[in-house]
Image (tube, helix red, strand yellow):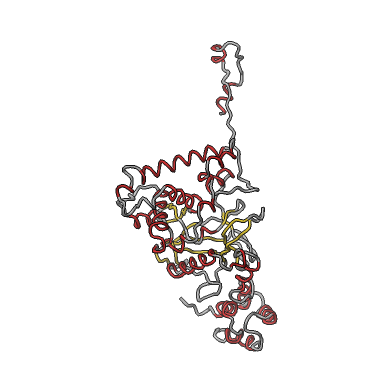
Amino acid sequence: MVRSTIGPIATALSMLQWNISPSMAFSFAPNAGITNKLHQQNYLSSNSLDRKIRTKLFMAGGEGGEDEWVKALLEAGGSNQSPGQFEEDMKMKGLLGPNRGKGNPKLSANSRLIQWLETEGGVYLSEASSWGEAPHPMAISTETKDEITNESSGRGLLARRSINDGDELLKIPLNLCITRKSARDALGRDALPDGINEYLAIACQLIHEKYVLGEKSFYAPYMGVLPEVEEVNPTFTWKDEDLAFLEGSPVVAATRSLQMKLRREYDALLGGEDGLIAKLPDRFPKEHFTFENWEWAFTMLFSRAIRLRNLRVGERLAMVPYADLINHSAFSQAFIDARESGDWLFKNGEEEVILYADRGYRQMEQIYISYGQKSNAELLLLYGFALERNPYNSVDVTVSIAPRTAEVAAANEGVEVDPLAQEKIDFL
């Protein structure tokens, strides 16, 4: 819906992103005062906002005037870069991989994902503004660095411009996400009953989309950016000789327990005599529904799936394209969630995944969210990494005492009564 008061706001965005001259941009604005001021500047460059134009805009109108809205919008634009300049800067900084991204298959995979999101979901990811849409504030980087250790953290999202605390960072339609519902729709409700565990259902769909359908899959562009097991490398995929290096750590016991659980679940649902591979071989071909692919699916789930809490049906586990490219920081307070789509007045009945910035970001700074308050043992087990500075790190300590009560001492020669024995037992 176009409002009659959008003149100074829309035209400022137009000047920032469409590279037309100020006089042309503001000739469409209903505010004649701004139009006249900017007509006087028509001799200036049309490729960016010249410093003289900024000075005139910022001095005109006074505090609280319409020009102050223009000023705020110009500042929100982050910079007066021409379209494509941010990607060139990323190349120069090595954020698009070696050789400035030339021949990097991850770049084409990123572009394909963005095109799919825009075409199939109407997700606005352009660096330019449009009617009713501000420029998208983030860009995909194929190579990111940890802000503390400077180690590689793989793909991630960077701030394309300056971002303020509370800014909306992304909106992804729920119907583009992979959920238990989408899995049952894809593989049949007879195969995946209503009460099936969400992880099991989504794991089946991930295998179906990536290995069975391949390039024919609706989700093929999303599958193309999902990493291989070796790139994530959680401990539950490690070999015994590698796991031996962690001997003495509680991660070892947790890893072996998870490995056994994954094997049991695979055999019960897919690989056993009464499994889906035997019952429905056309939908669950054994050459694709292997245990190795099962491990890959759960590597994706444990490291990327998001628990959406504010849905009409309650909580739901989902694989959310694009949003799951954001890396973890233990110091972030940002969490991805869901809401009903539409503006504050008109809702369309659909739902979408949403993320807001929990702090300000500078241009080129990596965007972070929190995966939860997890210790390094949990992160290593499920995500394949540990943090040098982790305020939620913990060590499990097992404490036991000999209950030297009067009864125990009487039954065991040489055992002295501990007058605090009962209090210790009650405390534990």
* Residue 149, image x, y percentages: 67, 53
Residue situated in front as seen by the camera: 187 or 189: 187
* Residue 398, image x, y percentages: 58, 31
- Residue displayed at 43% across by 56% down: 311
Q: Quadrant of the C terminus?
A: top right
Residue 214, placed above or below residue 126: above
Side (left or right) of 352 relative to 250? left
Residue situated in front as seen by the camera: 60 or 221: 221
Residue 292, placed above or below residue 212: above
- Residue displayed at 54% across by 49% down: 233
Side (left or right) of 193 relative to 323? left
Q: Quadrant of the N terminus?
A: bottom left
* Residue 285, image x, y percentages: 35, 52
- Residue displayed at 52% across by 43% down: 239
Residue situated in front as seen by the camera: 213 or 186: 213
* Residue 45, image x, y percentages: 65, 84
Residue 388, placed above or below residue 3: above
Q: How many marks?
A: 0
Side (left or right) of 149 relative to 333? right
Residue situated in front as seen by the camera: 33 or 244: 244
